[in-house]
Amino acid sequence: MEHEETGCQAPEGPILCINNCGFFGSAATMNMCSKCHKDLVLKQEQAKFAASSIDSIVNGGNSSSGKEPIAIGNVDVVIGSVEPKTIVSEPSGASPSTDAGEPKPKDGPSRCNTCRKRVGLTGFNCRCKNIFCATHRYSDKHNCPFDYRTEARDAIAKANPVVKADKLDKI
């Protein structure tokens, strides 16, 4: 009779989580277990963050009211990656293997450009666009026509542009 006077009622039995995960829920966590409730709160926070970032992008970063938008309910934001596709269209009469004016490279074994020794996969590519064996791989061993000095000067000049201050008018 004491329960009837105070208005408190004892629960009839344990309540299962409403997400059917197998754990027990409580009224404090909206009849969800602690894990499902934590996941729900995390999704709501992510939705608020996504909505505020989208709003700042749309409005150009200016928030005139200073209030953040509030999302009610579960919002799932799915962001997929976009990969560019390259489409090459060829005339119907031309075959892809025939190029106008370019000779097809030889499919045979690769050889050193100096001693003609077979190098296979162990050949060294030089900046002069030739392949060399281990003996002739250095530029001084195969009389390389590539101008390393000019290439280095151009790279340094490109990496370090000349900075000149504007002249100021004297007062």
Image: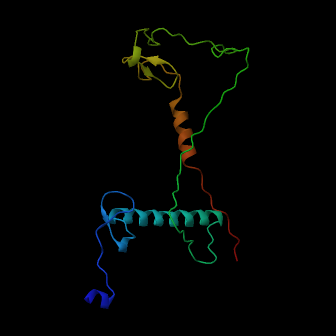
> Is residue 134 placed above or below 52 in the rendered structure?
above
- Quarter in which the C terminus is drawn: bottom right
Residue drawn at x 34%, y 87% is 7
The residue closer to the viewer here, 94 or 25, is 25
Residue drawn at x 45%, y 62% is 43
In which quarter of the view is residue 142 placed? top left
Residue 19 position, x and y percent, is 39, 59
Residue sticking out furthest to the bottom: 5
> Is residue 119 placed above or below 165 in the rendered structure?
above
Q: How many labels does the image show?
A: 0
Residue drawn at x 36%, y 57% is 20
The residue closer to the viewer here, 156 or 107, is 107
In which quarter of the view is residue 24 placed? bottom left
> Is residue 119 placed above or below 40 in the rendered structure?
above
Residue drawn at x 26%, y 89% is 2
The residue closer to the viewer here, 164 or 23, is 23
Residue 82 position, x and y percent, is 57, 43
Residue 74 position, x and y percent, is 50, 63
Q: How is the image coloured?
A: rainbow
Residue 132 position, x and y percent, is 43, 17
Horizontally, is 54 left or right of 108 in the view?
right
Horizontally, is 118 left or right of 68 in the view?
left
Residue sticking out furthest to the left: 2
- Quarter in which the N terminus is drawn: bottom left
